[in-house]
Image (cartoon, rainbow, N blue to C red):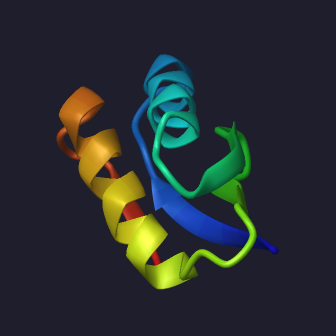
Amino acid sequence: MKKTYHIEVDCANCANKMEQAAQKTPGVKEAVVNFMTLKMTIEFEEGRDPKTVMQAVLKNCKKVESDCEIDF
């Protein structure tokens, strides 16, 4: 399952760090961040709860960019 989320991030480098952090999160099959549109697209692993995974994604993203936000 793929879902797209609105994100708040200040720069393209920060967006790249968020993408890398999201990709390392358990339950995420693939993550893509588009800084220009402020969107994050997540493809979840089979059988994973998107809300639970996204809470972990946000936690991991805040480790690399403390003021980032993801609307989910």
Q: Identify which residue, 34 or 43, lies in the foreground.
A: 43
Q: Identify which residue, 12 or 47, lies in the foreground.
A: 47
Q: Is residue 45 left or right of residue 21?
A: right
On the image, the x and y values in percent for residue 60 come to: 30, 43
Say above or below: 45 vs 36. below
Question: Residue 69 sits in which quadrant?
Answer: bottom left
**Exactly how many numbered labels are in the figure?**
0
Q: Identify which residue, 26 or 14, lies in the foreground.
A: 26
Question: Residue 1 sits in which quadrant?
Answer: bottom right
Toward the front, the furthest residue is 47
Residue drawn at point x = 50 percent, y = 17 percent: 13
Q: Is residue 22 left or right of residue 66?
A: right
Residue drawn at point x = 27 percent, y = 28 percent: 64
Residue drawn at point x = 31 percent, y = 48 percent: 68
Q: Identify which residue, 47 or 57, lies in the foreground.
A: 47
Q: Is residue 71 left or right of residue 39?
A: left
On the image, the x and y values in percent for residue 65 come to: 27, 33
Residue 38, visible in the rendered structure: no
Toward the right, the furthest residue is 1
Say above or below: 53 vs 25. below
Say above or below: 47 vs 68. below
On the image, the x and y values in percent for residue 44 come to: 69, 64
Say above or below: 1 vs 39. below
Residue drawn at point x = 50 percent, y = 34 percent: 24
Question: Residue 35 sits in which quadrant?
Answer: top right
Residue 49, visible in the rendered structure: yes
